[in-house]
Image (spheres, helix red, strand yellow):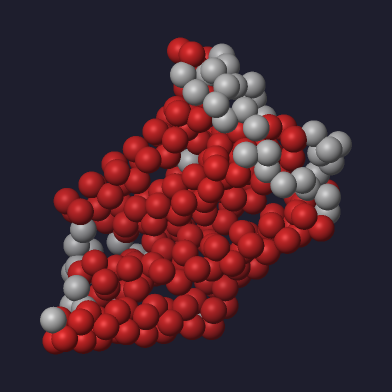
Amino acid sequence: MTSATTAGRTRASRVLALAATELKLIVRNRTAAVSAIALPLGIGLFWAFTFDTDGEPARQSVVLSLQLAVVLGMSVYVTATQTLVARRETRVLKRMRTSGLTDAGLLVATTAPCVVLGIVQLAVFAVIDAATGTPAPSDPLPLVLAVIGGLALAVTAAFATAVVTATAERAQITTMPIVFVMLGGAVGLSAVPLDGWWQALVLFPGAALGQLVQLAMTGATWEPGPAGLPAVLGSAVALVGWPVVFGTLAMRNLRWDPRR
């Protein structure tokens, strides 16, 4: 029991050490720092100070949805994809597999800094939004689901996108479709009514984020939605489904050697 506990602690310390190193590399890389930190913060702060919500929860959800989507899309998804591809192309991932880390631990250590950056930025936005008069959510549950499910979506999408991305530079192109869909869907569904044909848009990756934020701000979480089911059900299922799809694709096709 003691040896197993010691081995577990050793593996955990190695994961933390590698994650700390990856975080330093991201912060020290000017290009990564701009795209993962400065740009998302700039966009989110610009909307917080310039978008007139008139105190309406539905309009306030638009700002919160954009902030959430831009952090998940750019700070987490794009940065994690670039990091995974760069480490694979330089054979760092393959060499680290001989260090005693499990494959899962290695992938967690590589992508964890992106998740940490995303959470820190969301915390900054929460403080700024409160300072500018945005009220607390009427029902925090959908917002919590949006953050947790959104992080799972961004990380698994990064794994799946890394499979088809040959170089870190090309990740700027291969990540664009999901980033645009996530931003457009989240902002769009944060403003539309909770009934009607456009609710089908919740099936697009990341679009459920906007609806969950709207439910959190308006408190309509358990009101009847499509087919008379609770309004939160469709978006929650969609937000769980996409990480499963992306995770399955990544597990079946993940490669440790550089793509040619």
Name of the residue lying farthest toward the front? 1
Which residue: 74% across, 35% down?
Answer: 57
Q: Position of residue 75 (x, y in %)?
A: 53, 61
**Residue 137 at x, y = what percent?**
68, 43
- Does 114 appear above or below 177? below
In the image, taking residue 129 as reference, residue 156 lies left or right, namely left
Looking at the image, residue 99 lies above or below residue 105: below
At 54% from the left edge and 79% from the top edge, which residue is drawn? Answer: 27
User: What percent of the width, then of the height, locates residue 93?
Assistant: 25, 75
User: In this view of the protein, which residue sits in the foreground, 36 or 128?
Assistant: 128
In the shown orientation, is residue 134 left or right of residue 21? Answer: right
- Is 112 displayed left or right of 62 in the figure? left
- Inspect this view and state whether residue 148 appears: yes
Residue closest to the eye, 140 or 205: 140
Check the image and report above or below for 230 versus 41.
above
Q: Residue at x 43, y 82 (%)?
A: 20
Which quadrant holds the N terminus?
bottom left
Vertical order, 251 against 39 (above or below): above
Where does residue 252 sit, x and y in percent of width and height?
17, 51
Q: How many marks overall?
A: 0
Q: Quarter-wise, where is residue 21 in the image?
A: bottom left
Does the image show residue 94? no
> At 52% across and 71% down in the image, what residue appears?
32
Q: State which quadrant residue 58 falls in.
A: top right
Classify the position of the C terminus by image quarter.
bottom left
Q: Is residue 162 left or right of residue 102?
A: right
